[in-house]
Amino acid sequence: MVLLEFQLDRNVLDDDRATDLGTADAGALQETYFLMPVRLKVSEAELLKMPPGGRGRLTSPWLTLPILHVATVGLHKVKEARESGTSTYTLPGSGWRLRFAVSGQDISVYSEVSEQGSCARYEELLQAFEHFASTVREVLSRETPELKEHPQWGRWLKTG
């Protein structure tokens, strides 16, 4: 079982909407806006949960990440692992990484956040990331309609 989800934080959306999202820098939108709690569970492993005594004191399975980055770069890194056998996804703002390695129909995921690894069927992980991207697209289209006017992200919101 693979679960990749986020919790919508309306306060973050309100703060982000204080900027003209239609003209904001594309890279900034991807890496520093829409910071929401994200959870990745592969089999029984909570891969974004910090272990007790780790870099942080919280042991929640949720890690605050820019959902636009996870939806685009994260998905790309999963697909890259299929093509090249391995890939590494650096989580923005943290320096932590998720490492993907494909073997046959399976993919292993190692998280520097939780210091754990787990395995799943490649298609299951891919579908989880695709569903996440679709949900981000739907939520941002609905909650931040002005983002549809952005030269880069407007096109992304309209695809899929």
Image (spheres, helix red, strand yellow):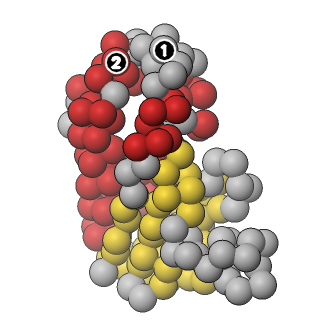
Q: Where in the figure is residue 89, as x and y percent of width and height? A: 59, 55
Give the number of the disc on residue 43: none
Mark 2 nearby-residue class (10 Å; few <14, some 14–19, many ≥20): some
Task: Tell me the residue at 64%/48% (across/down).
Answer: 92
As shown in the figure, which amino acid type bears the numbered disc 1? Asp
**Do the residues bearing badges 2 and 1 touch, measured as CB atoms within 8 Å?**
yes
The residue positioned 28% from the left and 67% from the top of the image is 123
Residue 100 x %, y %: 53, 67
Location of the C terminus by quadrant is: top left
- Picture residue at 32% right of the left edge, 54% below the top: 132
The answer to whether one can see residue 47 in this image is no
Q: Is residue 17 above or below residue 81?
A: above
Q: Nearer the viewer, residue 88 or 3?
A: 3
Instruction: Name the quadrant containing residue 140.
Output: top left
**Closer to us: 81 or 71:** 71
Question: Where, quadrant-wise, is the N terminus in this rendering?
Answer: bottom left
Instruction: Kindly state the secondary structure of the residue where label 2 is placed.
Output: helix
**SS class, disc 1:** loop
Question: CA–CA distance between discs 2 and 1?
Answer: 8 Å
Q: Identify the residue under disc 2.
A: 146
Q: Is residue 113 left or right of residue 43?
A: right
Vertical arrangement, residue 139 with respect to residue 121, above or below: above
- How packed mark 1 is, by other alpha carbons closer than 10 Å (few <14, some 14-19, many 20 or more), is few
Q: Which residue is mark 1?
A: 20
- Asked if one can make out residue 1 in the rendered structure from this viewpoint, the answer is yes
Which quadrant of the figure has residue 122?
bottom left
The residue at the point 56 percent across, 82 percent down is 117
Indicate the position of residue 54 as horizontal and vertical percent values.
76, 79
Q: Name the amino acid type tagged 2.
A: Glu
Residue 62, position as x, y percentages in the image: 51, 68
Horizontal placement of 97 versus 106: left or right?
A: right
